[in-house]
Image (cartoon, rainbow, N blue to C red):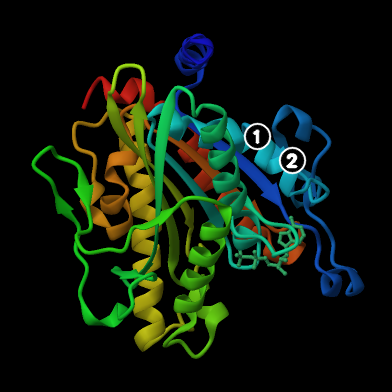
Amino acid sequence: LKYSEEQAKRKQLYNQIQETKGNIRVFCRCRPLSREESSNGCATVVDFDAAKDGDLGVLTGGSNKRTFKFDRVYTPKDGQVDVFADASPLVVSVLDGYNVCIFAYGQTGTGKTFTMEGPEHNRGVNYRTLEQLFSVARERSDAFTYNLSVSVLEVYNEQIRDLLATSPASKKLEIKQTSEGSHHVPGIVEAKVDNINDVWSVLQAGSNARAVGSNNVNEHSSRSHCILCIMVKTKNLMNGECTKSKLWLVDLAGSERLAKTDAQGERLKEAQNINKSLSALGDVIYALATKSSHIPYRNSKLTHLLQDSLGGDSKTLMFVQISPSEHDLSETLSSLNFATRVRGVELGHARKQI
Ligand code: ADP
C-alpha cells in the first residue's frame, strides 16, 4: 500500500513535468582534453560558465560565441555517478511500465562508450542501470515481481546481429510485427538475469562477440550501433495484472562525416549507412515533434527496431557527447545542432496526433 501511494505521487509529479516539458531529455557531456591534446597545447572551445543552468557556450572563432541549451550540461569534471544520478529516475520508470530509450550520440572519441559502458573500475550507465533495477525490484518485492531479461544486439551496415547467439552468422535477423502491433526480432537470445553477476557475464559475452570477425575492434565499434535491450515483465501481486516494458541503451555509431574523397568501397557503404540511420533517428523524432501524420520509422533498422519505444508515452534521453578541442569544432557544432533539433520534441503532445 505504501508503494501504491508512492507510485501515485510519482505519476502525478511526472504528469506535471510532462505537461511542461514533454518526454525527451537531452544531456550534453564533454570529455576532458586527452593527455596528448593537453601536451600539444590544444585550445578548448567550450565554456561552462552557465553549465549549471544547462547552457553550453562554444567559441566559434574570433570573439564569436554560440550558446546551446540542454536539460543538463556535464563538464569534464563530472563523473559517472553525477551522470547516473540524473538518468536514474528515467531508468527506474521502466519498472512502472514505461518504455525508455537512452542514446549516446557524437563523434568517435567523445566518450559515448565511456558514458554507456565505462571502464571496469568506473562503470557507466548500462551496468548502473541494471544494478539500480535489481535494487528497486527488491525494495518493491512485497507488491510486485519482476522478471528481467537482456538482449545484446549490434546494427552494422543496416543488418542486425545478435551478440548473444552461439552462431551469430548463421541466421538473418528481421524485425516482425506481432498481431498486437508490437515489434520484435524473432529468434534473438533473451538472457534471463536474476542478479548483477548474471548481468556482468552477459555483457562480457556480448562485448567478446562484438570483436569476432573484425580486424580492428575499435574501428568496427565506431561504425556500428551497439544496443542493450532490457525487457521487464511485471506482475502486480495485489491484482495479478501483468505488464511488459523495455529499456533500450544505445551506443550509436560515430556521427563524424567522412571527407568525401576519403571514403571508397566498403568504407563508403558503411558511412552511408551510418549517415542514413542517424538521420533517420533525427527525422523520426522531428516528425513526432512536428506532429506529422507519418512517422518514418521504417527508414532505418535502428528506428524500426526501437519503434515501440519512440513516441507515445515512451521516454527518451539522448547524451550528446562532445570534445572540448578546437580541432573538433566543426563536428562539435554539428552534434550540438543535431541535439538541439532533437530537444524540440514533445513526445507527449505528438502522441495525440498519431
Ligand atoms: P567513443 O565511444 O565516443 O568513441 P570513448 O568512450 O572510447 O569514445 O572515449 C574516448 C576516450 O576518452 C577514452 O580513452 C575514454 O576513456 C576517454 N573519455 C571519454 N569521456 C571521458 C570522461 N568523461 N572522463 C574521462 N575520460 C573520458
Does residue 347 appear left or right of residue 74 in this picture? left
- Quadrant of the frame with the C terminus: top left
Q: Position of residue 348 (x, y in %)?
A: 37, 22
Q: Position of residue 149 (x, y in %)?
A: 39, 51
User: Of the residues shown, which amino acid type is indicated by label 2?
Assistant: Asp
Does residue 319 appear left or right of residue 152 in this picture? right
Q: Which mark is residue 86?
A: 1
- In 3D space, how far apart are the residues under numbered discs 1 and 2 (Cα atoms)? 7 Å
The image shows residue 92, relative to residue 117, as above or below, that is above
Residue 107, quarter of the rendered image? bottom right
Does residue 232 appear left or right of residue 299 in this picture? right
User: Can you see residue 345?
Assistant: no
The image shows residue 67, relative to residue 42, as above or below, that is above
Q: Does label 1 point to a residue whose CB lies under 8 Å from ligand 1?
A: no
* Closer to the camera in the image, 152 or 313: 152
Rendered residue at 50%/17% (across/down): 14
User: Can you see residue 62?
Assistant: yes
Rendered residue at 75%/62% (across/down): 121
Rendered residue at 88%/74% (across/down): 40
Q: Secondary structure at mark 1?
A: helix
The image shows residue 220, relative to residue 155, as above or below, that is below
Local packing at callout 2 (Cα closer than 10 Å; few below 14, some 14-19, many 20+) is few
Q: Does label 2 point to a residue whose CB lies under 8 Å from ligand 1?
A: no
Q: Secondary structure at mark 2?
A: helix
User: Of the residues shown, which amino acid type is indicated by label 1?
Assistant: Asp
Q: Residue furthest left?
A: 179
- Residue beneath label 2, please? 82
Label 2 near label 1: C-beta < 8 Å? yes
